[in-house]
Amino acid sequence: MAKITDLAGIQFKVLNKSKGPAVWATRVQCDRALYRKYMREALEAQEGLDIKQESIEEILIEGGQVIGIKTTPSPQPSPSRGEGEKIYKSKAVIIATGTFLNGLIHIGLENFPAGRIGEPPSIHLSESLHALGFKIGRLKTGTPPRLDAKSIDFSVMEVQDGDVPPPPMSLFTKEIINPQLPCYMTYTNAHTHQAILDNLEHSPLYSGVIKGIGPRYCPSIEDKVVRFKDKIRHQIFLEPEGLGSDEYYANGISTSLPRDVQTKFVRGIKGLENVKINKFGYAIEYDFVYPTQLRPTLETKLIEGLFLAGQINGTSGYEEAAAQGLVAGTNAALKLKGKGPFILGRHEAYIGVLIDDLVTKGTKEPYRMFTSRAEYRLLLRQDNADLRLLEKGHDLGLINFEQYDSFLKKKEAVEKELKRIKSTRVKPQIINPVLEKLGGSLVKEDASLYQLLKRPEIRYADIAEVSPSDNGISPDVINQVEIQTKYKGYITRQAELAEKFKKLEDKIIPDNFVYKGTNGLSKEIVEKLEEVRPLNLGQAGRIPGVTPAAISILMIAVAKQKR
């Protein structure tokens, strides 16, 4: 996905650069057509992978184990859609339905079944899951209008350029070759807000037509105007759909208001006075499976071999779905090979935080991954993703030897340079002119390069000026050396906390452990533990309502049962 993002990217930007490296994040605007093209080519070139296009009617189960799927007979048989009902046998099935599961689109008070505009929903599959005994809920999300670029006055908007040079998403990309496009920023205003407030009775969200729960952190423009009445304006980011497209995505004004109201309030926005709307915004309701019914591998507890990934698990957006698809696919393959599961801890990856939150705490609204959800976010930086995870990818067979060798060389280079700057000392007469120029306090005796680099005003380039490395060092190695030096104290503290946390994670709760009847555990806590069936004491402690006292009782009870 990262490699294809680099092939399709038309704007690259590192967000939060004014803050610390714990919250830096590379955002890429992709050309939709190019992304689809390159991803399809990658899939079709993958050895051992067959791609079929059919509608699934039913999941086939035998003795609590998935044995395959049954397709829906096509009303209009064609070579691409198949003819009649078919059965595909399989020992593992992954369901990733997006918003298609019993999808219902709303534009104003008009609604119709669809997975997205122009595509039918998956209705029978939802019925099949319900019949199997899964607890199913209803969520809602939305999309903004798409605007014709030729009718937009960009000259009155704020230009949002990407970084130069563009920072790649993949570690293995050497250069971004696509032309880069700007995004644009404009704002809603009093006219926009009044047009929305005057038409709330036509909003399915406020007239009671929509029953599903929407995303709290990415609300529709109707929600923003009603809930944040003190705000006189809201940001709108106009994002290009692609190099060969004249369409812009109006990020920030997701809406389900009627078409005429959308036209009225959008044309009241600066730069959009004469805009032509190519596709109107809409809301979509869809079914999801409460994620506490899943294991951390994303296999369902109810049916062996059945995995769920993406919005079906109550998450929002692309990144969350991509992360789950990776984990579900990996674990399905490992299960079929008779190997142990692939589970990332909260201290190892945001994927670990995301999945642990879902399967332990559950969600009643579309779940979004934020850096603030992670206890150890200074350990989970984007710059050290390879140091944290690439070895795991290599062990799974996802990273080839050439890539792995490149990673080992980088790791060695970082360690070697850290060792050099710790052991190299410079005299005051050499470093003080540099410190004076930077406005830092002068030294009176020899100082190590490492201690100097810890200072906030000093960058690696400053110490390299007085004591360069014998070998040329790549920018990513320099970046790693600088971050590991400057944030050493914070990183060490978080690593120590993570180690304590890991001790509880290592205390496994047997699959057959009986919570009922454990002395000291309340009925409410027993019910919560029975629902989640935590893998270990660490996970048990994160279940809402399970107290530290209950964990102490559980620790003794588990040890007693093991004896």
Image (cartoon, rainbow, N blue to C red):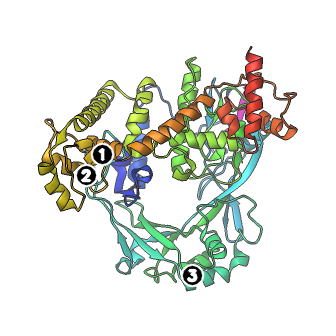
Which of the numbered marks, if any, corresponds to residue 31?
none
Residue 526 pos. (x, y %): 82, 35
Q: Earlier in the sequence, mark 3 or mark 1?
A: 3
In this picture, is 399 found above or below 547?
A: above
**Can the viewer see residue 228 in this picture?**
yes
Q: Which residues are magenta?
A: 56-65
- Separation of marks 2 and 3 at Cα, in angstroms: 47 Å
Tell me the element at label 2.
Answer: loop
Tell me the element at label 3.
Answer: helix
Q: Quadrant for the N terminus, please.
A: top left
Residue 297 pos. (x, y %): 61, 31
Amino acid at circle 2: Arg
Residue 400 pos. (x, y %): 35, 26
- Separation of marks 1 and 2 at Cα, in angstroms: 7 Å
Neighbours of disc 1 within 10 Å: few (<14), some (14-19), many (20+) = many
In this picture, is 543 found above or below 11?
A: above
Report the side of 167 relative to 229 (left or right): left
In this figure, which residue is indicated by the disc labeled 3?
192
As rendered, which of 118 and 16 lies closer to the eye? 16
Q: In the figure, residue 62 lies in which quadrant?
A: top right
Eye-nearest disc, 2 or 3: 2
Which of the numbered marks, if any, corresponds to residue 459?
2
Q: Quadrant for the C terminus, please.
A: top right
In this figure, which residue is indicated by the disc labeled 1?
482
Report the side of 405 relative to 189 (left or right): left
Asked if marks 1 and 2 touch (Cβ < 8 Å), the reply is yes
Q: Is residue 129 magenta?
A: no
Report the side of 25 relative to 406 (left or right): right
